[in-house]
Image: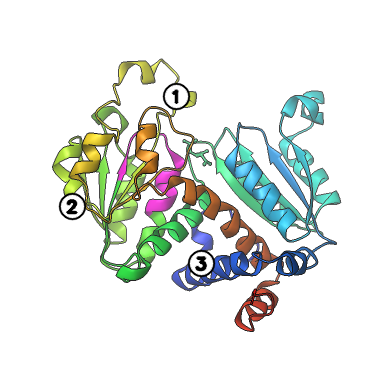
Amino acid sequence: MFHVVDTEAFDRKRLDQLCELATAVRRVAKSIDGARFLQQLLPTRRAMLYFTQPSTRTFLSMNNACHVLGIRTSEIRDPEVSSEVKGESFEDSIRTFSSYVDLIVMRTPEPGYAARAAALMDSIPRPVPIINAGSGRDQHPTQALLDIYTLERSFEERGGIDGRTIGMMGDLKRGRTVRSLSRLMRHYADVRLVYIAPPAFEIEPDVRAFLEAHRIAYDETARLHDVLPELDAIYVTRMQSEHDTAGESARVDLSDFSIGERELTQMKADAVIMHPLPRGREIHPRVDADPRAMYWRQERNGMWMRVALLATIFDSQDAILEADTRGLFREA
Ligand code: NCD
């Protein structure tokens, strides 16, 4: 593994390995000695977190995932405090970061920048891996990874993701998490996707083309209540109003695309409710106490999955798997 620019970085084997590693890591981290063992795996490595678009979970879980493995981090979260304000180009800024660190994790409001950074790295003598932590409306591959991990864990007793019916709801036009997660579904057999959105926020043509090219079964509807009883999981998303160019959000009512107590009664007893967070009004806080609400666990899974990803990039996966298999740090 080197760059993680989009979901093409992962095939089924890699996804299964990362899920297995995330679970091993969290087991090892449970004891103090295990947590210490993880921290001494990569103490000479340094990572740069370059986040010029707001982020809470992705930033904090990446930062803390680095710390779990002993990787030290530095950050720029505001382009106003970097030399870009002096007119330094994006490429020169990235090259500069790469001079000091062993990995760059980046989030930008515009699409395509992580790919540009990776292409730059591939052309210089001392390249470092680039991880895309969200590129505008386009992709969010590490979110898709933790979403896969959450689905796998939730369906553990039911044979995993293969064969499941998964709904995705909300602002599907401008949400990058849905695009990335949809793309990873090509690695699972007999999955059916149901996209639930008002006409103004339907999935983009590139997502449809991808699904068709990879023969992934899907439906689109604006009627949540028609499909809710069939779903094994529903992935709820918020209005992406930061991408408004002409007040689009204000013209669309997303209240029919939300989960509350009434919706809970229509869902399968073992369905899974997910959300990349942050949420707006699309999931009522009263849903949080329902055993089907998985989004807080999903958030925490994100840190462990990012530890697994970092460990894989820096080739520490075998040490972790071995410690876990041998039960080295398991409490008696
Ligand atoms: C998502 C994002 O940034 O795309 N958030 C996240 O990383 N957990 C989803 C969102 O902001 O709606």
**Type of amino acid under label 2:** Glu
Q: Position of residue 42 (x, y in %)?
A: 79, 64
Q: Is mark 3 in CB contact (under 8 Å) with mark 2?
A: no
Q: Is mark 1 in CB contact (under 8 Å) with mark 2?
A: no
Which circle marks residue 241 in the picture? 1
Q: Position of residue 324 (x, y in %)?
A: 62, 77
What is the number of callouts on the image?
3
120 relative to 199, above or below: below
Which quarter of the figure has residue 262?
top left
Which circle marks residue 19 in the picture? 3
Residue 62 in view, yes or no? yes
Label 3, residues with CA under 10 Å away: few <14, some 14-19, many ≥20: many
According to the picture, the residue beneath numbered tag 2 turns out to be 230
**Quadrant the C terminus occupies:** bottom right
**Residue labelled 3 has its Cβ within 8 Å of some atom of ligand 1:** no
Q: Residue at x 44, y 29 (%)?
A: 240
Helix, strand or loop for disc 2: helix
Magenta region includes residue 78: no
Label 1 to label 3, Cα distance in Å? 32 Å
Q: Residue at x 50, y 64 (%)?
A: 10
Span shown in magenta: 168-182
Q: Residue furthest front?
A: 332
Q: Which tag, 1 or 3, sits closer to the chain's start?
A: 3
Which quarter of the figure has residue 49?
top right
